[in-house]
Image: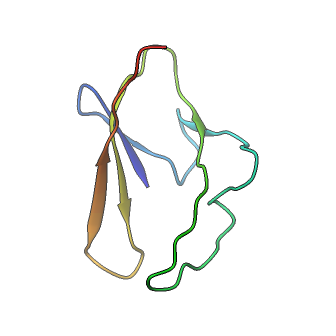
Amino acid sequence: MTLVGSTGREYDVTTPGRVQPWGVKLPGLDQGMTIEGKQTVVGYLGWVLPDGVRLRAFRYQLELGPDVAEWTLVRRAV
């Protein structure tokens, strides 16, 4: 899993570094679960970001393959 900042900088969120995991309330997706074909699971992933980091994308690559999925992150006004 990789978070991509607005400047294009990539943050690997699978190893300790500048981006720290954030304990989220269930349903959580960071418990190593297996999702079968056509199965839908709702959950949350969370990280604590350094001050000033603005994100533009979240990337996920499966361990055993070259396929990468990317979601564009949109910041909403609160």
In the image, residue 59 sits, relative to residue 55, either above or below, namely below
Count the numbered circles shown.
Answer: 0
Residue 52 location in percent, x, y? Answer: 43, 14
- Which image quarter is the N terminus in? bottom left
Please identify the quarter of the rendering in which residue 77 is found. Answer: top left
Please identify the quarter of the rendering in which residue 33 is found. Answer: bottom right
Judge by depth and name the residue closer to the eye, 9 or 42: 42
Instruction: From the viewer's perspective, tell me whether residue 9 is left or right of residue 20.
Output: left
Instruction: Determine the residue positioned at 52% across, 22% down.
Output: 50
Instruction: Determine the residue positioned at 54% across, 35% down.
Output: 19
Instruction: Determine the residue positioned at 38% across, 23% down.
Output: 54
Colour option used: rainbow
Judge by depth and name the residue closer to the eye, 26 or 63: 26
Instruction: From the viewer's perspective, tell me whether residue 6 is left or right of residue 23.
Output: left
Residue 12 location in percent, x, y? Answer: 44, 47
Instruction: From the viewer's perspective, tell me whether residue 78 is left or right of residue 30.
Output: left
Instruction: Determine the residue positioned at 53% across, 32% down.
Output: 18
In the image, residue 43 sits, relative to residue 9, either above or below, namely below
Residue 37 location in percent, x, y? Answer: 45, 85
Instruction: From the viewer's perspective, tell me whether residue 78 is left or right of residue 66.
Output: right
In the image, residue 60 sits, relative to residue 16, either above or below, namely below
